[in-house]
Image (tube, grey):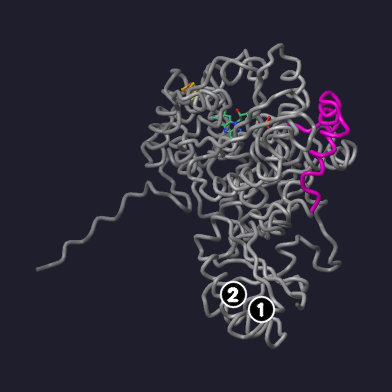
Amino acid sequence: MRMKIQTVLVSVDSSSALRGARQFKKHIEENVKKYQLSDMVEVLETGSLGVYKDGVIVAVYPEEVFYEINSTDDAEQLVTEHFLKGRIVKDLMIDKSVIKHEKKETGKLDREERIVLKNVGVIDPGAIEEYIARDGYMALAKVLKEMKPENVIDVVKKSNIRGRGGAGFPTGMKWEFTAKADNPEKYVICNADEGEPGTFKDRLIMEGDPHSVVEAMTIAAYAVGANKGYIYIRGEYYGSIDNIRKAIKDAYEIGLLGEDIMGSGFSFDLSVRLGAGAYICGEETALIESIEGRPGRPRLKPPYPPVEGLYGKPTVVNNVETFSNIPWIINNGPEAFKALGTEGSSGTKVFTLVGNIINRGLVEVPMGTSIFDLIYKYGGGIPNGKKLKIVQTGGTAGTFMNTKKLEIGLDYDSAKEGASLGSGVILCMDEDSCAVDCAKTVMEFFAHESCGKCTPCREGTRVSVKLLDKISKGQGREEEVEQLLMIADVMEQTSFCGLGQSAAIPLRTIVQSFRDEFSDHVQKKPCNACTFVEPKKKKRSKR
Ligand SMILES: Cc1cc2nc3c(=O)[nH]c(=O)nc-3n(C[C@H](O)[C@H](O)[C@H](O)COP(=O)(O)O)c2cc1C
Ligand code: SF4
């Protein structure tokens, strides 16, 4: 049999699936068959290729050409032109530098080696053998055969990796607390709730490389002495749920989960639990309540989960991206990880670029990369020749800024300079956006998601929406703008959990960064995108 010499990788993450990826894949396969190219061309599924366009992105190897497919005609043209006639289809081709983040002049990679996304958009996430072929489960084998649990924790501590879920707590320290907790029953939980609007990095990691999470959780369980783990996935993440469930099933089948893994005597059981889309369930103690079968409401801390977590037992809770780094750290050593990023924030970070930005999608770059580079170098700038006006970094609970601070490098310390890292969202809004409307939308989200347990958050979010609504309609007063800042302070200082405390950040920073625009609204001076201008009264038509 002849070896297949060309491969088409069709990006079939859930966003591409909605754009018709599976239908286009089928059409490419049918045409490959129709033109008798089946011996030469194979068509495979993969995770996200990073960038989102209107159509579905496919990659052709070994030529490394990327196409955007918008219709079944495009799919047929790809086969007849590229594979049958050997011609690049210029009309469908997208600039390689957009996907690979290459400098156009030199062709050299601009970003460091991918760690978390190294398999995403490269392997078929449903094929465990493809993960294994790219060193998958090698770190687990090394840990089980060559390392004691305390050595594993030592490596993780030395790497200086900090949690990618928002709070940035040192992962090695968290594992050490759990390992040292005096209780024979322990748990490992992966927080895959990802309720932050605009963040979809964890989804694409789970859809594109589910085994990296399974492998890392097993390593964590060995390190802390846990025999049971849960991946708590947001209920609407159908693609992630399917791919993680399949990865778990396949890992069980070949002895990488369950009893006596790789003959090491260590056993670990892993299963999926589903969230129901409440943002608060991403908070680790609310998540634990939810797994235990109760409404997702946060617990008083301390005690923290490493001491008293699931069912009152010591529990490691880590974010999907945090876990995904672990096999690489074990395989490459803590020094290699520390060589990336900044002194206080080692490694890379997966950023989600959203809003008015040309290359929407994911990019993995070293910690400390500037907001400017993320928006203009990787994100390609602002579409339609518009000017950038508002940026929010870190997610909905992150900081707002105008365009004066774009040189800040994002890491765990950049919040002090006015730009939080959070979950790694870069939200761009162009000159047609209104800062007051934007603040109102964000606070409506928090008011909706507040669990209602404590007064500062329940009332603070509700009252700020009311005030912002008045201001946005040109009915507010200057002292009400000041009141918003006061509410932010009270929420931050007195809310029971991180939801209310962090809701203060976007509220305060948008008012401070766009103070003049808030005053303009009070004085009924419309901005570019204003909604408060009274609609002109229609003239009565003469009869
Ligand atoms: C309201 C709220 C929502 C949160 N949502 C998430 C989430 O979706 N995913 C996540 O990993 N962490 C989330 N966190 C942070 C978790 O409580 C916890 O710090 C994190 O899962 C720990 O993992 P890490 O150390 O790997 O970052 C949230 C926190 C708060 C206060
Ligand atoms: S701050 Fe209070 S009301 Fe808000 S989500 Fe947390 S516990 Fe619930």
**Disc ID at residue 38:** 1
Q: Local crowd at mark 2 within 10 Å, few (<14), some, or many (≥20)?
A: many
**Between marks 2 and 1, how big is the CA–CA gap?**
8 Å
Q: Is mark 1 within 8 Å of ligand 1?
A: no
Provide residue 509's location: percent of width, then percent of height.
Answer: 58, 34
Report the span colored magenta.
Answer: 134-162
**Residue annotated with mark 2:** 29
Which residue is found at the position 67% from the left and 66% from the top? 9
Which residue sits at x=75%, y=61%? 100
Amino acid type for the residue under numbered disc 2: Glu
Is residue 371 something one can see in this rendering?
Answer: yes
Q: Is residue 279 within the magenta segment?
A: no
If you read the primary sequence from the N terminus, does the residue marked by circle 2 or circle 1 appear first? 2
Q: If the image is split into quadrants, where does the C terminus sit?
A: bottom left
Q: Is residue 141 above or below residue 376?
A: above
Q: Secondary structure at mark 2?
A: helix
Foreground of the two, 272 or 190 = 272
